[in-house]
Image: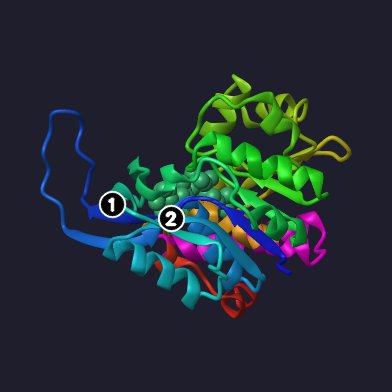
Amino acid sequence: MTGIAVLGSTNMDLVAYAAIAPKRGETVTGREFRTIPGGKGANQAVAAARAGGDVSMIGAVGSDEFGVRLRHTLESSGVDTDLLHTAEGPSGTAHIVVDDEGGNSIVVIPGANGTITALAPGEEALIATADTLLLQLELPLSAVLDGARAARRHGVRTVLTPAPAQPLPLELLSATDLLVPNEHEAATLAGVADPHRAAETLLRQVPEVVITLGSAGSLYASRDTAPLTVPAPQVTAVDTTGAGDTFVGALAVALGEGKPIEQALAWASAAAALCVQRPGASTSMPYRPEIDAS
Ligand code: ATP
Ligand code: RIB
């Protein structure tokens, strides 16, 4: 029995901190290098578990040392890893440059994540026991689709983060209950830059959308209610890596507990605002008492 199942990626983030990210053909001297457990799937699992959710992770780490650390980070945050495979070969890695404004650019090398092409035996049974399935796009699309279909068969609420941005099969959108793109992903999927118009367009395919707008907060839209804009707390961001994942993990917990949407969005925004004030992905994700107190 699990409240939140996550089918997604694990990456070791290889992070270079530099004043300004280099342009093509340019070399810059940075300040610091860190290896920090991340990956959109693992981040959402860690964020949800620390926010108080009962969370299980489906995915893979590699057979290298990064894999050991990635698994440990999930487990020490309270995530069940019984269905987290160890695939022979390297773990996924994300090569990240974080600049002095806290912004980032990322190249992801899938590694072990690329071995998850479909649900394995036992994984549909786990999804069937969950209230919510969290999906992102760092596993092969065939596996994401498999997960979404399984969730649909068992009446499990599906929350899709459509990142990294890419065109999506209609079947995946039709099996999604709540879509949570950032502004750029929303523009890519909807073909229109304005978030309100993008939300309107996306509602033709999914019943509910939250577009995250960075320091400007988030925009919620559904087929049944008027759009809702929720501001982000005013904070100084040092590293926004994992902010979207923290937001989604906390939102899933809040909605699972039956919080009304406006309250759930405000709580998720508080969690994400804590995340951006500290460096790294998993390293910056808050535990529940901190979210409640902020
Ligand atoms: P990332 O890829 O960096 O993890 P994202 O691009 O998926 O993030 P954003 O829209 O940038 O998503 O941020 C997600 C949420 O995090 C926002 O809706 C907001 O609640 C919070 N957030 C992001 N940046 C800031 C900031 N500078 N100050 C306060 N909150 C922030
Ligand atoms: O969403 C943030 C994550 O994206 C990072 O942790 C990195 O692994 C990339 O996949």
State the residue in front, 58 or 216: 58
Q: Give the magenta-colored segment's residue range.
A: 253-281
Q: Position of residue 136 (x, y in %)?
A: 56, 44
Q: Position of residue 148 (x, y in %)?
A: 69, 42
- Dot 2: element: loop
Which residue matches tag 1? Answer: 100
Q: Is 274 contained in the magenta span?
A: yes
- Dot 1: element: loop
Which residue matches tag 2? Answer: 10
Q: Is mark 2 within 8 Å of ligand 2?
A: no
**Lateral position of residue 130 relative to residue 71, left or right:** right
Q: Residue furthest right?
A: 224
Q: Position of residue 19 (x, y in %)?
A: 21, 49
Rounded to the nearest angstrom, the CA distance separating label 2 from label 1 is 26 Å
Q: Position of residue 175 (x, y in %)?
A: 74, 36
Looking at the image, is mark 2 or mark 1 nearer the viewer? Answer: 2
Number of numbered discs present? 2
**Lateral position of residue 106 relative to residue 203, left or right:** left
